Image: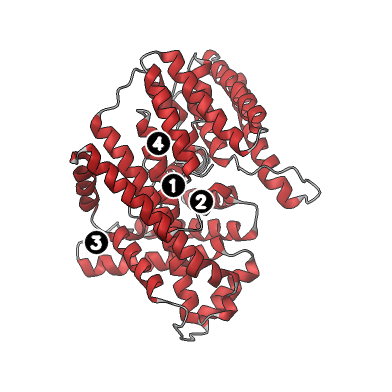
Amino acid sequence: MLLTGSAYFVFLAGVFFLYWAVARWRLPALAVVLSANYFFYARWDLAYLAIIPMASLLDFALARGLDASKHVPIRRLLLALSLLVNLSLLATLKYIPAFYHPWQWTLPLGLSFYCFQALSYTIDVYRRDAKSTPSLLAHLTAVSFFPTILAGPITRVSSLLPQLEKPKKLSPADGSRALFLIGLGAMKKLLIADYLADNLVNRVFDFPKLYSGFEVLAGVYGYALQLYFDFSGYSDVALGSALLLGLKIPVNFNMPYSAINIAEFWRRWHISLSSWLRDYVYFSFPGLRGPFMPYLALTLTMVLGGLWHGASINFLLWGAWHGLGLAACRAWQQWRAPRKWDHWLSRALATFFTVQFVCCGWIFFRASSFDSALDILTRIASLTFATANLSGPILLIAAIALAGHYAPRLWLDRSEALFARAPFFAQAALLLLLAFSIQYVAATGSAPFVYTQF
């Protein structure tokens, strides 16, 4: 059940009306959301109804033990058990099939986001950054929250639990903002990301030797736009879905291709993942006050982040590319105090070179194999020029995508406020117009979100 499919919107509407009918009572409200979570999993595969509750029960018990115990060895053992449970899920469902081909048991939905959310809870309790909840129902609900489970944002369970426990009301402003975000996310995904993927990106990456170097370069830039609008579109729908239930989850993107260096890029791109890696991986390395360890820790953290996406040489190289970039950026800032990029030209140049660095990494991220990535780079290096495959509609959608990304945040805020002030019938008319536009442009339906494979 994709978050931009009609089945999902029917499901979300049903959950919305049922939830707010019982929202004043804590236990029925939690039961509605938990049932929705497990129904959402079951739509992918019934096996999840055994895997997720069992893993969640173990984490709940371990977190209660971490809260109750004052003995360091026991607390370390309990945390190690939580790490073992969740990392075993990742290994069993993602990494073992990649390396051991006789292992044929695969499920359609990866559990990477679930495992990171679950680990954030037990690690927070272990560090005394959060208290464990005595409510099993609340824990089961928070750790498997359906809008985030396919592709994030990675939501800290300790931040979601208090919201689930307190009484809620849905204000007209929040309801309008939720609908605006869902509509915006659907538009990003279906009108921009899927169009670029079908008409440019997939063709170039599947058969790079059939295209000129300029067209292949355009395909790489097209993938940068496709991935952003696909993933940020999912995040918008997830944020809107949660807001319809009175819950607020973290924003995941903030104009990432406006970053002036790679460190700022990671403060703007997949913010929930980069902050998770910083808080739970990077800060776990010993000796971070030493002269060399911070650079090694940055590199290793991003290598692990790359391997989180999948067990392949391409993801390892992509992670190492960004890790080395972050280490070099840190070294430069240590050597030369961070400067203010006040002049528009210097900021534009810094942004341009940061985007080139990021797009070079996207080649390995998207290519099906290492050899395919080399083919992409070879075609770009050939400097051949032809534009026969860059049609007017492709260029138009790419231009709209660029304008949408680089438009001032104030414009989006004003559009959202204008939508919120519009009467109900006007909001409904705009959403219907969007639905008809999507039906016209994306007649073949929605492709799976890119990050659901991770």
Q: Which circle, 2 or 3, is nearer the viewer?
A: 2
In what element is the residue under mark 1? helix
Residue at 37 percent across and 43 percent down: it is 182
Q: Earlier in the sequence, mark 4 or mark 2?
A: 4
Residue placed under numbered mark 4 in the picture:
241
Residue placed under numbered mark 2 in the picture:
449
Q: Position of residue 125 (x, y in %)?
A: 49, 24
Q: Is residue 411 left or right of residue 272?
A: left
Asked whether the beta carbons under mark 2 and mark 1 sit within 8 Å of each other, the answer is: yes
Question: Neighbour class for label 3 at 10 Å: few (<14), some, many (≥20)?
Answer: few
Question: Is residue 328 visible in the rendered structure shown here?
Answer: no
In space, the residues marked 2 and 1 are separated at their CA atoms by 7 Å
Q: Position of residue 15 (x, y in %)?
A: 44, 28
Residue placed under numbered mark 1 in the picture:
234
209 or 27, nearer to the observer: 27
Q: Amino acid at mark 3?
A: Trp
Q: Is residue 139 left or right of residue 251?
A: right
Q: Earlier in the sequence, mark 3 or mark 1?
A: 1
Where, by quadrant of the figure, is residue 56 drawn? top right
Task: Indicate which disc residue 341 carries.
Answer: 3
